[in-house]
Image (spheres, helix red, strand yellow):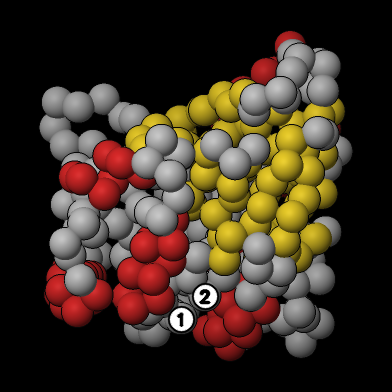
């Protein structure tokens, strides 16, 4: 039975969320969910998550996994809300501990915050095999954007590539966040592009040029032929030079500071303070 996949676009963060399943009435995985967050007011809402809930209910699915490709810097995860509504295990790669260690120091998080990934229900080892119902899946470690980035190979036919490759006319993910490494990203992308030409690649974000609608699907062949940053013939040295120069001119994502301190907690909010209010920190002059 071939995998079915339903994409959902959050236009505010240009994020693609996916529901992967084998058939109506069966198990599913939700990948890279989004919790709405208004930085001006500090208010959260669940409009994007409710779209996922409605699809799951309509198709009588049972949520088995709530997968994260990495600790996102551009949106807050809705995984804890979805787990409360629908069940499932929140999972990420085991190298999340490296990211937690960096950001515990940056945000001076509470002493009780553990940097062992225990906030997540499951930590994938590199190349670990798991299942979505009867669908075979594999967790691929693809560091570079962050040390903990994962891609998910589903049914040997499609890969949810996270923040590695974008659509061919957009290029590749940045590598200038703490722990990022352009050499590692190049190796990760070449690993993905070594899959058969017809392997479908589903991107985590799309930032389309003017006049093109947002897309989520490309193939290995399309990437190897036309990715503006890493098409066949671009060697590691040329990519690293391009990526380093390009990253130096990029601004920080609008939601990096609120998002990362939530997402290293598996989407959970920090503990409330003694007045019952939850606060997010903004470290000054650190990034």
Q: In the image, what residue occupies the spot 64% across and 38% down?
A: 155
Does residue 110 appear to the left or right of 60 in the view shown? Answer: left
Q: Indicate which disc, 2 or 1, sits on the residue closer to the N terminus.
A: 2
> Where residue 204 appears, x then y in whole percent?
45, 45
Residue 209 visible (yes or no): yes
Q: Quadrant of the N terminus?
A: top right
Does residue 61 appear to the left or right of 267 in the view shown? Answer: right
Hey, which quadrant is residue 234 in on the image?
Answer: bottom left
Asked if the residue at tag 1 contacts the one at tag 2, i.e. Cβ–Cβ closer than 8 Å, the answer is: yes
Q: Residue furthest front?
A: 196
> Where residue 74 appears, x then y in whole percent?
44, 54
Looking at the rendered structure, the secondary structure element under dot 1 is loop
> Mark 2: few, some, or many residues within 10 Å (few <14, many ≥20)?
many
The residue that disc 1 covers is 179
Residue 71 visible (yes or no): no
Q: For the residues marked 2 and 1, what is the alpha-carbon distance in whole angstroms?
A: 6 Å
Closer to the camera, 127 or 61?
Answer: 127
Does residue 42 appear to the left or right of 46 in the view shown? Answer: left
Looking at the rendered structure, the secondary structure element under dot 2 is loop
Q: Tell me: residue 72, above or below residue 155.
A: below
Image mark for residue 238: none
Q: In the image, what residue occupies the spot 82% across and 23% down?
A: 26
Q: In the image, what residue occupies the spot 52% across and 28% down?
A: 7
Hey, which quadrant is residue 13 in on the image?
Answer: top left
Q: Tell me: residue 146, above or below residue 79.
A: below
The residue that disc 2 covers is 147
């Amino acid at each position: 039975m071939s995998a079915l996949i339903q994409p959902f676009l959050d236009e505010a963060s240009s994020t693609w969320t996916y529901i992967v399943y084998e058939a109506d009435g069966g198990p599913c995985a939700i990948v890279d969910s989004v919790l709405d967050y208004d930085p001006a007011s500090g208010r959260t809402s669940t409009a994007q998550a409710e779209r996922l809930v409605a699809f799951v209910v309509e198709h009588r699915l049972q949520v088995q996994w709530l997968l994260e490709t990495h600790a996102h810097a551009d949106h807050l995860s809705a995984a804890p809300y979805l787990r409360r509504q629908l069940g499932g295990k929140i999972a990420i790669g085991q190298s999340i501990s490296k990211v937690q260690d960096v950001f515990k120091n940056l945000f001076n998080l509470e002493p009780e915050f553990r940097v062992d990934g225990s906030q997540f229900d499951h930590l994938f080892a590199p190349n670990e095999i798991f299942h979505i119902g009867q669908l075979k899946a594999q967790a691929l470690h693809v560091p570079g954007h962050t040390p903990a980035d994962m891609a998910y190979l589903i049914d040997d036919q499609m890969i949810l590539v996270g923040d590695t490759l974008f659509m061919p006319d957009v290029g590749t993910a940045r590598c200038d966040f703490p722990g990022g490494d352009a050499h590692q990203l190049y190796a990760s992308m070449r690993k993905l592009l070594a899959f058969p030409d017809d392997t479908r690649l589903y991107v985590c974000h799309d930032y389309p040029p003017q006049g093109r609608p947002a897309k989520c699907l490309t193939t290995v062949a399309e990437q190897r032929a036309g990715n503006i940053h890493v098409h066949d013939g671009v060697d590691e040295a040329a990519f690293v030079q391009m990526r380093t120069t390009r990253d130096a001119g990029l601004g920080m994502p609008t939601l990096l500071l609120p998002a990362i301190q939530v997402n290293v907690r598996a989407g959970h909010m920090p503990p409330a303070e003694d007045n019952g209010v939850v606060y997010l920190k903004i470290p000054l002059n650190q990034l």
